[in-house]
Image (tube, helix red, strand yellow):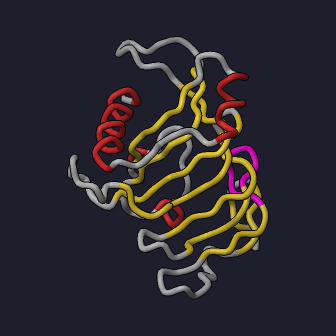
Amino acid sequence: MLRAASATVLLLCTACGRDAAADPSDEHLLAAYPGGSNFESIEHPDLQVDCPVPAFLFGDGTQIATGVAVPTGERNRDGGQPVHRWGLWRYYHVASNHVGDRSTWGHLAQRGEFRDGKRVGEWEFWYPGGSRCAQGGFVDGAMDGPWQVWGTGGDLDAEHSGTYRAGSKVR
């Protein structure tokens, strides 16, 4: 399934004219992990398989993810190969699903780092219109430490803001 999604994104990327060139730090990662590649995929909240986040962070729309992926394990029956995400990844809201529409890539949706396929460190999230949604840290793929979450109107969301440990809100 990742191979099909990747091909779709390349079509969208080519159609919108966006330069999906690697971040300068990607070159170092690609050199350190032979077989790694700049990877792009279309992701939807219902289809988050390898690195899910809570729905209030992902939102309800489709996003385009881009970053470095390193192959892990053997190829699947369909020819695809599991990958782990590494380094800085960026996700963009999809402004349109029509191939050929130049507005396909929307505002930045989320940005942060992966290590061995898991979210780590500080991450930031934005709503489709560009306003801030959330900011906080991940440890070993789970929300951890202080988190601030804002509603679409810009007010602090007390239900989701607070301190998290191993993915659960503790205060």
Query: Number of marks in the image?
Result: 0
Q: Quadrant of residue 79?
A: top left
Q: Is residue 36 above or below residue 23?
A: above
- Residue 12 percent location from the top left of the image: 31, 44
Q: Say which residue appears at 45% left-offset and 64% top-offset.
A: 107
In this rendering, the answer to whether 90 lies above or below 4 is below
Q: Where the N terminus falls, by quadrant?
A: top left
Reply above or below: 13 against 110.
Answer: above
Residue 158 at x, y percent in the picture = 63, 82
Q: Position of residue 129 (x, y in %)?
A: 42, 74
Give the side of residue 73 with respect to residue 25, left or right.
left
> Could you tell me which residue is drawn at 59 percent across and 23 percent down?
36
Q: Main secondary structure of the magenta part?
A: strand
* Residue 91 in the image: above or below residue 117: below
In the rendered image, which quarter is residue 84 located in? top right
149 or 158: which is nearer to us?
149
In front of the other: 124 or 106? 106
Q: Is 156 inside the magenta-drawn segment?
A: no
Hey, which quadrant is residue 47 in on the image? top left
Residue 40 at x, y = what percent? 45, 38
Question: Does residue 24 appear left or right of residue 108 in this picture?
Answer: right
Check the picture and name the quadrant holding the C terminus. bottom right
Determine the residue positioned at 42% across, 69% down.
128
Report the span colored magenta. 138-144
Q: Residue at x 57, y 30 (%)?
A: 69
